[in-house]
Image (cartoon, helix red, strand yellow):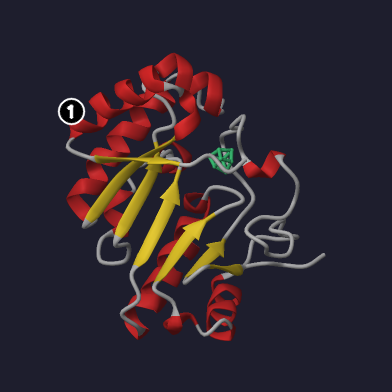
């Protein structure tokens, strides 16, 4: 099976650290075939080591990209040690901005506060708010941690604001006006920008 650890999306380079995730989102690309963004399969036959990620970055000539993004299939913070080590390698050797796309459940995954570990390594944290209400969030995201997830995700976002230059919430545009409005109210109350992105399922 092909192992796609890094893949190009336009002028950005995405890093695929794991297929594991505590959520089971109804819209997840993991449930819609095994190719994304024109890459080979993003299903990994094992979680890549720090060394494998660095080798993949070098092979892709990572310094030529406008941004490097930790993304999926899967939740990058499941591999927080490798994520931070790879981000440090990028920061130590280049000026390329680094983004983390996350479900925001890192503190629950690690049962500890984790946002501070991103300090100096991640420039933008993009957190999937997904919905404007807890009920809709749970219906859409189906997190294994259950009800506590919605608040834990928002608490993680608040913490990221302390340690990361740019923290952003995202929702997809198909959730309806009422949910988007409720999501905007949450984002505003936390002083976090909301990005409504186009659904590409
Ligand atoms: S959080 Fe991301 S990787 Fe996890 S199930 Fe949802 S969309 Fe998929």
The image shows residue 58, relative to residue 191, as above or below, that is below
**Residue 107 placed where, x, y %?**
38, 40
* Residue of label 1: 189
Neighbour class for label 1 at 10 Å: few (<14), some, many (≥20)? few
**Residue 18 placed where, x, y %?**
61, 55
Mark 1, secondary structure of its residue: helix
Side of 176 relative to 44 (left or right) = left
**Residue 71 placed where, x, y %?**
51, 55
**Residue 154 placed where, x, y %?**
31, 32
Side of 61 relative to 189 (left or right) = right
Q: Residue furthest right?
A: 1
Residue lying at 44% horizontally and 77% vertically, measured from the top left: 65
- Quadrant (top left/top right/bottom left/bottom right) for the N terminus: bottom right
- Quadrant (top left/top right/bottom left/bottom right) for the C terminus: top right
Q: Residue furthest top?
A: 135
Q: CB at mark 1 closer than 8 A to ligand 1?
A: no
Q: Quadrant of residue 59?
A: bottom right
Residue lying at 68% horizontally and 64% vertically, measured from the top left: 39
Side of 197 relative to 8 (left or right) = left
- Ligand 1, by image quadrant, is top right
Answer whether residue 143 is visible to the viewer in this image: no
Residue lying at 34% horizontally and 48% vertically, measured from the top left: 114
The image shows residue 43, relative to residue 90, as above or below, that is above
Front residue (pair 41, 85): 41
The image shows residue 114, relative to residue 9, as above or below, that is above
């Amino acid at each position: 099976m092909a192992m796609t650890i890094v893949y190009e999306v336009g002028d950005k380079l995405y890093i695929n650290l794991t297929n594991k995730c505590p959520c089971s989102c109804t819209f997840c690309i993991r449930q819609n075939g095994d190719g994304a963004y024109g890459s080979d399969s993003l299903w990994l036959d094992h979680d890549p080591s720090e060394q494998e990620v660095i080798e993949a970055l070098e092979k892709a000539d990572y310094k030529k990209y406008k941004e490097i993004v930790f993304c999926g299939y899967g939740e990058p913070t499941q591999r927080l040690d490798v994520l931070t080590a790879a981000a440090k390698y990028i920061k130590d050797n280049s000026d390329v901005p680094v983004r983390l796309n996350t479900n925001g459940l890192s503190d629950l995954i690690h049962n500890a506060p984790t946002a501070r570990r991103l300090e100096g390594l991640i420039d933008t944290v993009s957190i999937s708010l997904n919905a404007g209400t807890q009920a809709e969030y749970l219906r859409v995201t189906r997190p294994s941690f259950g009800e506590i997830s919605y608040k834990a995700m928002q608490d993680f976002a608040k913490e990221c604001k302390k340690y990361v230059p740019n923290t952003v919430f995202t929702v997809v545009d198909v959730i309806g006006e009422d949910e988007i409005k409720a999501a905007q109210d949450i984002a505003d109350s936390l002083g976090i920008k909301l990005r409504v992105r186009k659904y590409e399922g």
